[in-house]
Image: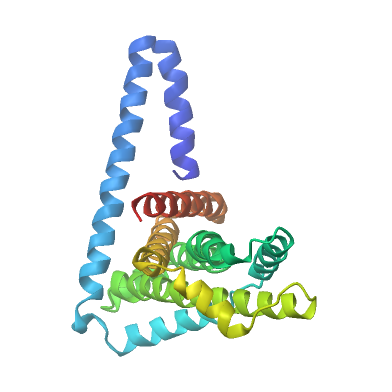
Amino acid sequence: MSESQELAVERNLRAAGKAGPGGVTAIIGQWAINQVLGLIQFTSIAVAVIWQGLRPLTWRRTVRAEFFEQCLQIGMRAGSLVGLGIVYQAIYWLGVFGQTEFTGSILVLVLVREVAPLFVALTVIGRSGSVILVELGNMQIGGQVRMLDAQGIDPFLFLIIPRVVAVSVCMFSLTIAFIAVALGSGFLAGNALGSMDFTLYDFVFGILAKMGLADFATIPLKTVSIGFVVALIACTTGLSVSGSRSDLLAALPRGITKSVLATLLISGVLTLLL
């Protein structure tokens, strides 16, 4: 909710307190209706993005240019080597306890299936999702969105679709790069510190041998789904801003919180299903 909506809810709650139990029930019912309507609106926008994104006619030159610009912003300026610590710690402690045969299984379970998609998602939310939200919020406040519409450019096609598709694609590519760098740097660190007694071939083959069909499906499903929802939340939250800069400042933490909760929910559900 925006700041004005929150103030309206507070006023309604005070009025409901004076009106008695019936007024409280009405406020709760109205809140539930607003949540359902918000979910329906979000779902309809998601379906529209998928439908329009699959149409070749949508990808005109201006939309393609915006898509490539978003890929550059998201893909080239986000990333980390935190996985190095996970890989090295797993190799070291399994070697200490003489259980190196479980190295592949543990790295697949911890790094590939869980940590990599989550960490990249949180990085993208903090670095790119917030930027998208603020950018579109400023465009909405400054009137650029209305200007695009007046010029015959559909803001939905020009602003939302390139960003949602770019985040989805870059989430997958960044996760693959994160896994490769984490495994490679962990292997090099283990060799440099003398805690590893097998070759690079044995290390890579041992990990791939422990990956089943579900593991190979988990990475694209998690990353693309999380990227899609995170970008959609950022776009819709930014474009819902109206009024002053204070509304945008209030919308930013709300959008980040929603994105993080959606990331954890999607990751947990797919982990249970796969």
On screen, residue 83 versus residue 112, left or right, reads: right
Residue 56 location, x and y as percent? 20, 83
Quadrant location, the N terminus: top left
Residue 157 location, x and y as percent? 29, 74
Residue at the image position 32 percent from the left and 71 percent from the top: 155
In the displayed image of the protein, which residue is found farthest to the bottom?
Answer: 61
> How many numbered marks have been drawn onto this rendered protein structure?
0
Quadrant location, the C terminus: bottom left
Residue at the image position 62 percent from the left and 74 percent from the top: 182
The image quadrant that residue 204 belongs to is: bottom right
Q: How is the image coloured?
A: rainbow
Residue at the image position 32 percent from the left and 38 percent from the top: 34
Residue at the image position 22 percent from the left and 72 percent from the top: 52
In this orientation, which residue lies closer to the viewer: 76 or 247? 76
On screen, residue 145 versus residue 124, left or right, reads: left
The image quadrant that residue 241 belongs to is: bottom left
Q: Give the answer, above or below, for where 273 lies relative to 23.
A: below
In this orientation, which residue lies closer to the viewer: 11 or 23? 23
